[in-house]
């Protein structure tokens, strides 16, 4: 009987060890599967993060390129406007220089001779006395009768013919004459100035 007990104990021990080995193998397999799953998820997450980072970098790079292109356009337009303004100022200055006292007097004399009814002749402030003094003959006599030459702060050079009722005017200022001349500049000069 002792033998049977020993056999039974050995059998129970053997079954217990085998069950323990089986359970430990099962636990080990389960742990390996969980570890593989953790590694797989970590890899997926790292791949997703890398992909997002690359997309964000590409977007940032495109945005930077677009900003550089826009800044280039802005500088180009600003430079063009500055050059246009400079040439317009030069043209206006040159026309203003050409409108000396003699030309201004000639223009006023022609306006007086035209005997435009209901019209005033506006000249720059401080120029009326000079213009009237420069007129001779019939223009001076006609002007003395009508006294329609007025000073206007808005007229910086040249003159402006205005209807007394305010319905219209003809501007012969240096600025307006320069605007009238601009379309007739040579093609090369216009291309140089205005692109």
Image (cartoon, rainbow, N blue to C red):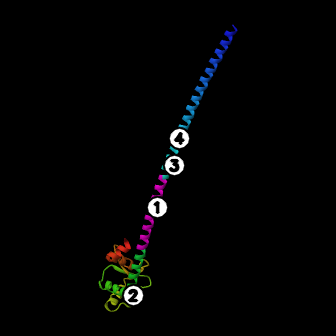
* Mark 2 crowd level (few <14, some 14–19, many ≥20, 10 Å Cα): some
Nearer mark to the viewer, of 4 and 1: 4
Q: Position of residue 158 (x, y in %)?
A: 38, 82
- Location of mark 1 (residue): 68
Q: Is residue 10 above or below residue 103?
A: above
Residue at 42%, 88% (x, y): give it. 129
Ranked by sequence position, the earlier of labels 3 and 1 is 3
**C-alpha span from label 4 to label 2:** 88 Å
- Location of mark 3 (residue): 53
Nearer mark to the viewer, of 2 and 1: 1
Look at the image and give the residue range highlighted in magenta: 58-84
**C-alpha span from label 2 to label 1:** 52 Å
Front-most of residues 143 and 76: 76
Nearer mark to the viewer, of 3 and 1: 3
Quadrant where the C terminus sits is bottom left
Ranked by sequence position, the earlier of labels 2 and 3 is 3
- Location of mark 4 (residue): 43
Residue at 63%, 22% (x, y): give it. 20
Could you tell me if the residues under marks 4 and 2 are in contact, i.e. CB atoms within 8 Å?
no
**C-alpha span from label 2 to label 3:** 73 Å
Q: Position of residue 85 (x, y in %)?
A: 42, 74
Look at the numbered disc 2 and give the secondary structure of its residue.
helix
**C-alpha span from label 3 to label 1:** 22 Å
The total of numbered circles placed on residues is: 4
Residue that sits furthest to the right in the current view? 2
Q: Is residue 113 above or below residue 6?
A: below
- Location of mark 2 (residue): 101
Look at the numbered disc 4 and give the secondary structure of its residue.
helix
Residue 76 shown in magenta: yes
């Amino acid at each position: 009987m002792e033998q049977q007990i020993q056999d039974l104990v050995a059998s129970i021990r053997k079954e217990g060890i085998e069950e323990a080995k089986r359970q430990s193998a099962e636990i080990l397999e389960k742990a390996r599967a969980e570890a593989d799953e953790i590694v797989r998820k970590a890899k997926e997450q790292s791949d997703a993060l890398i992909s997002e980072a690359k997309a964000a970098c590409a977007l940032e790079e495109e945005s930077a390129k677009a900003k550089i292109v826009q800044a280039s356009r802005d500088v180009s337009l600003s430079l063009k406007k500055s050059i246009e303004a400079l040439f317009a100022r030069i043209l206006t200055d040159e026309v203003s220089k050409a409108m000396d006292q003699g030309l201004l007097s000639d223009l006023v004399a022609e306006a007086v001779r035209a005997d435009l009814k209901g019209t005033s002749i506006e000249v720059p402030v401080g120029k009326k006395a000079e213009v009237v003094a420069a007129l001779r003959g019939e223009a001076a006599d006609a002007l003395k009768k009508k006294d329609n030459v007025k000073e206007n702060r808005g007229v910086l050079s040249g003159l402006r013919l205005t209807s007394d009722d305010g319905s219209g005017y003809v501007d012969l200022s240096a600025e307006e004459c320069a605007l009238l001349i601009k379309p007739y500049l040579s093609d090369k000069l216009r291309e140089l100035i205005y692109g």
